[in-house]
Amino acid sequence: MRELPGLLAAWEPAGGAGAAGTAGYTEAAAALADQYEEVGFEQVHRGMLHLLPATPSRVLDVGAGTGRDAAALARLGHTVTAVEPTAALRAHAGRQHAGSTVRWVDDALPELPRLGAAGERYDLIMLTAVWMHLAPRERAAAMRTVAGLLAPGGTLLMTVRQGPVPAGRRMFAVPTAEVLAQAAELGLRPVHQDERADLHGRGGVRWTELGFVRQP
């Protein structure tokens, strides 16, 4: 294990390395880091802030990017694990959020094999701008993985991009009805559904917000 400055990180090479959904992210990491950090956690998630745990909880941020959300949740007193398969983005996280208590893990959906092997369960799981990177055949498996990591009574919050695919990226259209059906099959009850505009003003891009609670 190697540590980023101020961050605990799992760096074993087999986890998220080469995950298909990360295509294009290494090359664009510097520009993406600036883009991610120019808007704050509260701004991005303002429609779902009321669903955050009111007391210190175990939080998992999957596809954490540069750690904007993970670091904000840690500042709120939560114990946060951040999963990010792109090494270049984890490196930016170490520089931009030095001193954070976030634990970083190199792993990737749909299976999250390293994280699942640890046997931990989480009270809140964040999936921000992740689900559209999974092919249709991968999303059902990914939902099973995520549901299995969610503690009874825990909350899952998702934001899913809708719109044109940037050059060099791997993205798919994600029907909201599909997500709702897959979640329902696994005992995840919907508690939030909304859409919002893109905060960066990109033409044709909108975001679907979805919140679920796992039945106790």
Image (tube, rainbow, N blue to C red):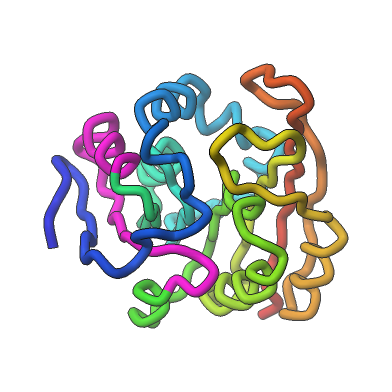
Determine which quarter of the picture holds residue 95: top left
In the image: residue 79, left or right of residue 13: right
Which corner quadrant holds the N terminus?
Answer: bottom left
Q: Residue at x 29, y 69 (%)?
A: 14
Residue 198 horizontal/vertical position (percent)? 70, 26
Q: Front-most of 26 and 132?
A: 26
The residue at the far right in this view is 177
Residue stretch in magenta: 88-112
Q: Is residue 200 above or below residue 1?
A: above
Q: Residue at x 59, y 33 (%)?
A: 167
Residue 99 sits inside the magenta stretch? yes
Residue 82 horizontal/vertical position (percent)? 38, 54
Determine which quarter of the picture holds residue 206: top right
Q: Is residue 34 above or below residue 112?
A: above
Residue 208 sits inside the magenta stretch? no
Residue 69 horizontal/vertical position (percent)? 46, 40
Q: Is residue 55 above or below residue 43?
A: below
Q: Residue at x 12, y 56 (%)?
A: 2
Residue 51 horizontal/vertical position (percent)? 65, 50
The residue at the far front in this view is 168
Q: Front-most of 95 and 70?
A: 95
